[in-house]
Image: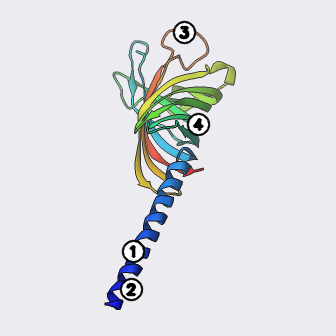
Amino acid sequence: MKLVSIISIVLTLCCGTFSILAQSSLDYSNQASQIQVGPFITGKGCVNTVDPPQGIQNDFQLSKLPDFGIRFSYKFEGTSQTKFIADLSYLSTAMKFKLYNDPNTNWVNEFYYFNIGVGAEISWFLLSLNFGIPLSGKWGIMKNVQIDLKREEIATLIQIRVGALIPLIENTIGNFYLVIHGDYFLTGALSQDINYNPRIASLSIGLSYMFNL
């Protein structure tokens, strides 16, 4: 009888201790996850959405370099899953032209930016604006031939982003996300106001780890 009582007391104490530790861990996780910061990296495929001159057509092109940077998020108080997000990143965008009568004759244009992004995340859904400062660029003039663009020849990037941050792993340290989003140029890529000024759409897939603070 005494043994049963002792076992009951021990089990009660163990259960109580486990409950306190679990609640403490949960509280810490909820509190810590209100603010997160961490790196991300994505690869992308791009296409120009503006019709090129006659005899030329747009083609799909993978960016030669990945996009990478640091993202910050702040979850608003309460039970809402709405977060303010901001990021600093290096963006790489490319597009390809090819001849209608000879698809093997093609040339690639490239644009590189230092980007500042701001927006919101609601559950998994992501909506933001990118403001990119031109760093460098290359303009294709024939197959396998490019010329360097001056920074003043490239327009400041204004780009809308829509996508998702899908959590793969969540714990008290942070969250590991699958990143999927589409981007679209709201302005032409070139600073000079010309016909056929490219506006590029792209699809990016990558990974991000956000540490709890």
Kindly identify which residue carries mark 4: 87
Q: For marks 3 and 4, give the CA distance.
A: 31 Å
Badge 3, how many Cα within 10 Å: few under 14, some, many 20+?
Answer: few
Residue, x 53% and y 57% (percent of image)?
173
Comparing labels 1 and 4, the label whose residue is closer to the camera: 1
Tag 2 and tag 1, C-beta contact below 8 Å: no
Earlier in the chain: of badge 1 and badge 3, it is: 1
The x and y percentages for residue 48 are 43, 23
Q: For marks 1 and 3, give the CA distance.
A: 77 Å
Task: Tell me the kind of residue under disc 1.
Answer: Thr
Please count the marks in the image: 4
- Where disc 2 sits, the SS reads helix
Task: Tell me the kind of residue under disc 2.
Answer: Ile
Q: Is residue 162 visible?
A: yes
Kindly identify which residue carries mark 1: 12
Tag 3 and tag 4, C-beta contact below 8 Å: no
Badge 2, how many Cα within 10 Å: few under 14, some, many 20+?
Answer: few
Q: For marks 4 and 2, give the CA distance.
A: 57 Å
